[in-house]
Image: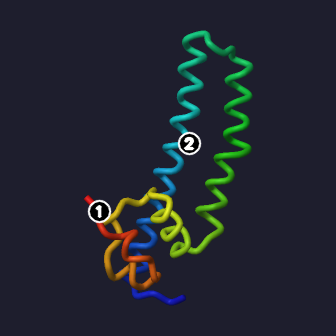
Amino acid sequence: MQYPKAVRKELNTLASTAYERELDSALEVLYESFNKWKAKQIDGFELNQLIHEFHQKKSRELWNMYNDKDEDFIVTRAARLGVLKPGEISVETAEAIQLDRQITEDRT
């Protein structure tokens, strides 16, 4: 679908923000594995395996999600999952991608 320039720009920014947040969240889990390794709760071989699994699974899954999809799909998905917070998506963009109003309104 063809969107106005301002909407395309916002979709691009929101998609990048969502990708970074999901990646950061996944990296937090991996970071905890480093803490366990430092505390001698796991050995270097197990940590290496966890790094490998992260790279082969979660990292690739996120890369594929955020690089093989349209930005309107990405933003809609991120909003529904709560990755993007209410109020972060402008009314114009929400209307353009037909995002449910209840997802984009700040419920605080």
* x and y percentages locating residue 96 in the rendered image: 42, 85
**Image quadrant where one finds the N terminus:** bottom right
Q: Position of residue 15 (x, y in %)?
A: 48, 65
**Residue 93's spot in the image, x, y percent?**
38, 79
Pick the quarter of the image with the C terminus.
bottom left
Badge 1 local density, few (<14 within 10 Å), some, or many (20+)?
Answer: few
- Which residue is at 48% across, 52% downward? 20
* Residue 66 left/right relative to 90: right
Q: Secondary structure at mark 2?
A: helix
Q: Is residue 9 above or below residue 1?
A: above
Q: Nearer the viewer, mark 2 or mark 1?
A: 1
Near mark 2 (Cα within 10 A), the count class, few <14, some 14-19 or many ≥20, is some
Left or right? Give the position of 24 relative to 61: left
> Label 2, label 1: how many angstroms apart (C-alpha)?
26 Å
Query: Which is more N-terminal, label 1 or label 2?
Result: 2
Q: Residue at x 34, y 63 (%)?
A: 86
Q: Amino acid at mark 1?
A: Arg
Is 93 or 101 nearer to us in this picture? 101
For disc 2, the marked residue is: 26
Q: Nearer the viewer, residue 83 or 56?
A: 83
Residue 72 in the image: above or below residue 65: below
Mark 1 lies on residue: 107
Residue kind at label 2, given as amino acid type: Ala
Classify residue 48 as left or right of residue 41: right
Count of residue discs: 2
Residue 18 is labelled as none
Q: Quadrant of residue 13?
A: bottom left
Question: As displayed, is residue 45 above or below residue 23?
Answer: above
